[in-house]
Amino acid sequence: MEILSSPNAPDLLTNHEVLTLLSLKSLSLTPFQSSCHTYLTSLPSPTSPSNLLQNLSHPSLSLENSEILQLINLMPDNIPLLNVILPEVEERFEEGVEGILEIVEKEKKKK
């Protein structure tokens, strides 16, 4: 989800952050916000993105912010799903594909 702070540079939020924001104002949600809250609470418990964000932001991975966000939100556990999130993943990360999955898997096990 994006919060438009300026037309040139929208801020990107993880599912965890959106759920936290919606929970803070749970008494005055619009119908759309209420639907988002219902959807996000139906998902497996969202992870706090700080550790995963730090690991995926490593310069050696060269991931875009939007790609990191999708990795945090979707927590892929296989290469086909990783292909959906990261365009040309096989060409971009010849040796790092398994490494990205290992980073995500390690975070899943912490839950």
Image: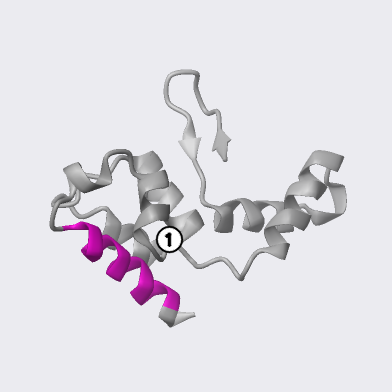
Chain part drawn in magenta: 96-108
Magenta includes 31?
Answer: no
Name the foreground residue: 2 vs 105: 105
Which residue is pictured at 49% across the width and 22% down the height?
A: 6
Q: Is residue 56 above or below residue 105?
A: above
* Main SS, magenta residues: helix
Across and down, in percent, residue 109 comes to 42, 81
Q: Is residue 89 above or below residue 50?
A: above
- In this rendering, does residue 24 appear at all? no
Across and down, in percent, residue 33 comes to 77, 44
Name the foreground residue: 108 vs 21: 108
Across and down, in percent, residue 98 comes to 24, 64
Please name the residue that numbered disc 1 is placed on. Answer: 76
Give the amino acid at mark 1.
Pro
Magenta includes 98?
Answer: yes
Left or right relative to 52: residue 92:
left
